[in-house]
Amino acid sequence: MEGRAFVVLLVIASLIVLAENTDHKNAIEIYSLHVDSTVTSRFAHTVITSRLVNKVNESREAIFEVELPKTAFITNFSMSIDGETYPGTIKEKTSAQEQYDIAVSHGQSAGLVKTTGRKLEQFHVSVNVASDSKVTFELIYEELLKRQLGKYELLFKVRPKQLVKHFQIDVHIFEPQGINFLETDSTFMTNELTEALTKVQNETKAHILFKPTIGQQKKSPELEETLLDGDFIIRYDVKRSVSAGDIQIVNGYFVHYFAPSEMPTFPKNVIFVVDQSGSMSGRKIEQTRDALLKILEDLRPEDHFSLITFNSLVTEWKNTLLQATGQNVESAKRYVKTVMARGGTDINNALLTAANTLDKANYAEILQAHSISMIILLTDGQPTVGVQDVEIIQQNIQKAIKGKYVLYCLGFGFDVSYKFLEKMALDNGGIARRIYEDSDSDLQLQGFYQEVATPILKDIEIQYPENSILELTQNSFKLFFDGSEIVVAGRIDNELDVLPVEIQAQSHTSNLIFKEEANVREKEKVFQHQKYIFGNFIERLWAYLTIQQLLEKSISAQEEQQKNLQVARALELSMKYSFVTPLTSMVVTKPDDQQKLHLANKPTESDNEKSRFTGFSGNKLSKSHITKALSFRRHHDQSMYYVHRAPKTGQRAILFDTPEHSPDTNEYPHFLFQLPRQNDVICLNIDGQPQAYINLISDPDKGVSVTGKLGRNRNHFVLFEITNLDPHVQLRVSKEGTVLSYGGHTTKLPWTKSASSTIQGLKIAVEKERSLTMSASDNITIKITFIKSPNRFLGLYFMDTDHFSDKASGLLGQFYFDTHLESNPGASQGEDERVLSVHGQKHRVTRKNKKDYRQESATGIISCWSLHITP
């Protein structure tokens, strides 16, 4: 293809053309960009139309990119070139993927949709535009606006990157209940651009038009640069009264909105379960502390609360819930300020502790009779300590909670398995939410808490005539929070003249019954003005809502047959109403190459995660997925060697990968350790000489060093020697026991009995036939586990490793700074491999299951990254 590529990027309501060609700036000119959005009774239908022309004497490629809300379903896309239209077609995802995979193998395809941020996903297609030719792109998507904190929001990111002759954002809103308030906001608005914005509003309708001229778009009269770069936001809410809500009917389908207000708030019993593992260190833990301090201030005096923090161990602020008095809140805030990030991640034990604390408080009648109990979990990684099988964790938590409490799961960043958290939350009446690592992460945490801080109704049942309503969406809800909204939709029997509704719910002070009747014929007259509706919009709203709820139910389905039925029905509706959902795809054939396919899939929240658990399904790991996730790829016939000289120490270590000599997954590794400030565990094996001493770690700043000796068969370590400089203490730990040397005296500590000694703040403790621990405040904790079966050996591991200095050296010491995992672009499909970067040197590691020798391990098996070293 001649020339260069030009990018046309539309961000919800914007178009970007990157046309920085030195010969022909803006060779691809956008001469018209219209974003027409019609919002009818919360259901938004958006049509994006852009028209371009190639102004030069050679062909150019235009890349059309649209960012649309994650909650939206694409319903149509087409390209028109010189009067000929090329439409996209909706297909069942499996068959579309097969067609796409064949094209991939011939280099004739490209993906169309990907997640790009908190609220957006990106649609992408390119087309070759001939000289003097015009092309029109049209994309249509639909979504049901969700009410949060008392308002609906339309967000438009405006970023054309060039001046557009005919540019407009045209929004029509029709709300039969009446519009209570309407506001617009923008991050780029100037006095000149304000003149291009018009708002017209009456009782039920609003029209917002943003139509800047070329002159108004310019940064200055001399520059051909646009001011349009930022967010354009419309917020509104509707009028409501304390009643059974509002029912709207069109062509045999109804939608019922219910959002009472001005009701007393239930007292809450809330336990915050906060991850303080090493991977939370730095900015994450700081923002978490800041958010918790603000959230604690927002607790009401009638609320009860507690805090649980966890890493390798679980720590309770108090062993019960306390009332949110000023004194108790201040005490909790002092505790929050001391929370530091270190150690592993024991999610299972932390949540079981929270459920048990609520159980004990209920039994002791500490909590109010009419109150709402909830657990809010915040974690940034996978379980690495204790129970690590996510299915078992999900089962354990569901059995412990037993439907008595609500569980909300917040995943911090992209190292978490969102599917794991989502299923666990849905199983227990809650929701999952991702917290994005950004400057406002603390505000995201506070924002989520505000959404669930004010429960005003519980056990809501919405009843309609059983024989007259067909295909009803969810009509039973556990909780209702002030500022949100319940939406129910269904199909009405043709013979029904009056639609009665009865709502039963419980408030803090009483049991409530709301009743309402809707005259079907009168309600249908409301939408006779076709200007404000698009087709059978309530039927499409019903289908949209049904698909979303079926997909959500399939995540927490207990039976495979039930899940299959839910997925099959969701697929049927997706195809019937032409929605691009997680079950369907849009196939686009490029006009310049009928063999080249583009595939638009609907990304899910988990698609953006780093591939930590290949093939994780959320419900269960299939045998084939587990096999792929644990497979160990053999790339070469011989080992790959890397020579590394550690900074500042001059120590030389040779690292290499030897898949051919990797131990079976049923065996113990020589060492287990967690990367500093990360959630990843390394399983390390060394190919050293038997009976030779190996310098494992030496940190002169911390005054500690450890050496070790392999047994005769090199399978395990049989001796460790630990030296602490202040106080000067030496420990010689063998399979027979420990010899402690201090001040010219020696003490024998056999494995046959427990013992402990404290020397100038340095604590040495032996747990009978289990472990030895050496610890001191503000220093590393060293632990050696005594394994007796099948062969006696010793297992070394470190805790509080964030205390290591950057002068740490030795075989293990080199990993405790400037070390991280990266993706492996060379890995074959289905393989779970990474690249471990150690001071800039790259080493291939593979996900394996190993036996876990650490005392804190409850399952005995750990998923880790396998690596080999030669000392």
Image: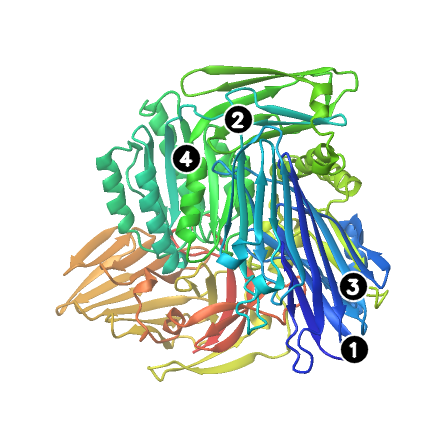
Residue 813 vs 139, above or below: the answer is below
Label of residue 135 in the image:
3
Query: What residue appears at the point 72 percent right and 53 percent down from the top-left corner?
Result: 139
Mark 2 vs mark 1, foreground winner is: 2
Query: What residue appears at the point 78 percent right and 70 percent down from the top-left corner?
Result: 128
State if disc 1 and disc 4 touch (CB < 8 Å): no
**CA gap, disc 4 and disc 1:** 58 Å
Residue 591 vs 121, above or below: the answer is below
- Local SS, label 4: loop
x and y, in percent, of residue 764 in the image: 23, 58
Label of residue 1 in the image:
1
x and y, in percent, of residue 462 in the image: 59, 21
**CA gap, disc 3 and disc 1:** 18 Å
Q: How many marks?
A: 4
Label of residue 588 in the image:
none
Give the amino acid type for the residue marked by disc 4 in the picture. Ala
460 or 84, which lies in front? 84
536 or 784, which lies in front? 536
Q: Earlier in the sequence, mark 4 or mark 2?
A: 2
Give the amino acid type for the residue marked by disc 2 in the picture. Arg
Q: Earlier in the sequence, mark 2 or mark 1?
A: 1
Q: Quadrant of residue 522?
A: top right
Report the residue marked by disc 4: 453
Q: Earlier in the sequence, mark 3 or mark 2?
A: 3
x and y, in percent, of residue 206 in the image: 60, 39
State if disc 4 and disc 3 touch (CB < 8 Å): no
Mark 3 vs mark 1, foreground winner is: 3
**CA gap, disc 3 and disc 4:** 50 Å
State if disc 1 and disc 3 touch (CB < 8 Å): no
- Local SS, label 3: strand
